[in-house]
Amino acid sequence: MWTALFNWLFAKHVGGTFMLRIEDTDQKRFVEGSTEKIFEALDWYGLTPDEGPQQGGQFAPYVQSERLDRYRQYAEQLVTNGKAYYCFCTPERLDQLRAAQTAAKQQPKYDKHCATLTSDEVATHKQAGETYTIRMKLPESGILVHHDIIRGTVKFQYNVLDDSVILKTDGYPTYHLANVVDDHDMGISHVIRAEEWLPSVPKHLFLYEAFGWTPPVFAHLPLLLGTDRAKLSKRHGATSALSFRDEGYLPEALTNFLALMGWHPKDEQEIFTREKLVEQFSLEGINPSGAVFDRTKLDWMNGMYIRALSVEQLLERLRPFWKLPDEKHEDSELLNIVRLIHDRLVRLTDINDFANFMFPSVWDTELPTIDRAIFVPKKGTIEATNHHLEQTAKWLSAYNGEWKSATLKEQMIAAIASMGKKNGEILWPLRAALSLRAASPDVFDLLEVLGKEESIRRIEHVCR
């Protein structure tokens, strides 16, 4: 999704077209439902294509498996022009060749065994019913100098390159042929893709030249790295695009975060609207040395975006994640709770841990399993803590003032001072009694949201 974001940003920045093409020519790796997941992810991230399988467009179809006749036509054209050849080598021969080269500490590559077959020999193989592939016929020597927008000048030596297959035995093209043909047919001006495709540039440029086509501009993005600067992998928690949605991240926070991975704006600004990202984005601002995926930074940014939402907006975002108790709850009650923990949420999935203790049924369930030590402040004792809670319950029962956080705070702080006690002696166990947590929202905010009756009930139950 990171690569898709950069393509989308660039297309929008230059007033171009963001196109989605489904590259499904490797049938062995095809996963049922994966295409639908791509549509769903792009929609959630807000990267809706201008043209594609769902939207249609002037270059339809946008699914490569529906364009097989065109790829075969171009592959056969290359054979006719001497830029490609039929290869009848069996998988067993190719395995033996690779094993021998590896044993000799040579770089594994095809040995051009079929490159010199005559037309009669090719016809004989075909008449015998032998399966074949079509391979590009690369030069055996020479250096290709190429300019990449992100990498700068890159040089390739043809003598170390492999005559890659461009049309497989099943009639499907490989990435090399399919993408070159489609990029030409669909008028693609810029190819922005992962660093792993950089070694394929000379093969693709060879195909463009063989067809007599002008190649697009290439930009190869840096590797994604963990905070240890190693390539991002499963041990770093690398995950699928939609899993971030399920973990409670906001799409606008995630796109902001991903945009700053590798791309650097002209100043130190970190929080961008989608419109500002489009306005300032440039391929030249991408650092080729690697982009660090820092989950801590993502959490911080997500929290910033959560706090920028109104309480009403946040409640709507929280609904899919909030596992409310069975009893019915009015929106006014839920909004009061959201208002209380608004500044504490990092991910939307935090809502259950941060808020559900406020519901009576959940609090009653948790009470028997709580470690009583969380009620005791530093240098305090269980006996003293129980006494202070009992006195607090009596004070709250007798309190007839306004049941609002600010008023409760003013009156209770004054009462604590009149008793010659420290605030922590009274307020620490009170907050723990109301929430059953060592860390929770402000104690006076809790009192207001829980209400007088529920607050007193909780304190008295803890003291039993």
Image (cartoon, rainbow, N blue to C red):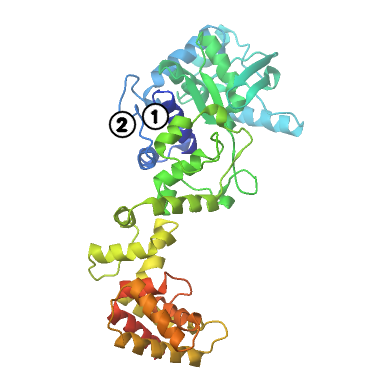
Residue drawn at point x = 24 percent, y = 71 percent: 327
- Residue topped by disc 2: 54
The local crowd at label 1, few if under 14, some if 14 to 19, many if 20 or more residues have their Cα within 10 Å, is many
User: Where residue 366 is drawn, which disc sits there?
Assistant: none
Would you say residue 89 is visible in this rendering?
A: no
Which amino acid, mark 1? Leu
Point out residue 125 in the picture as x, y percentages from the top left corner: 54, 15
Q: Earlier in the sequence, mark 1 or mark 2?
A: 1
Residues at circles 1 and 2 in contact by the CB criterion of under 8 Å? yes
Q: Quadrant of residue 91?
A: top right
* In the rendered image, the vertical position of residue 124 relative to residue 289, given as above or below: above
Which amino acid, mark 2? Gln
Point out residue 460 in the picture as x, y percentages from the top left corner: 36, 88
Q: In what element is the residue under mark 1?
A: loop
Q: Quadrant of residue 182?
A: top left
Outermost residue to the right:
104
Residue drawn at point x = 49 percent, y = 34 percent: 3
- Residue topped by disc 1: 20
Residue drawn at point x = 63 percent, y = 11 percent: 116
* In the rendered image, the vertical position of residue 63 relative to residue 376, given as above or below: above
Left or right: residue 9 versus residue 338 is right
**Camera-nearest residue between 22 and 416:** 416
State how far apart marks 1 and 2 are (Cα): 9 Å
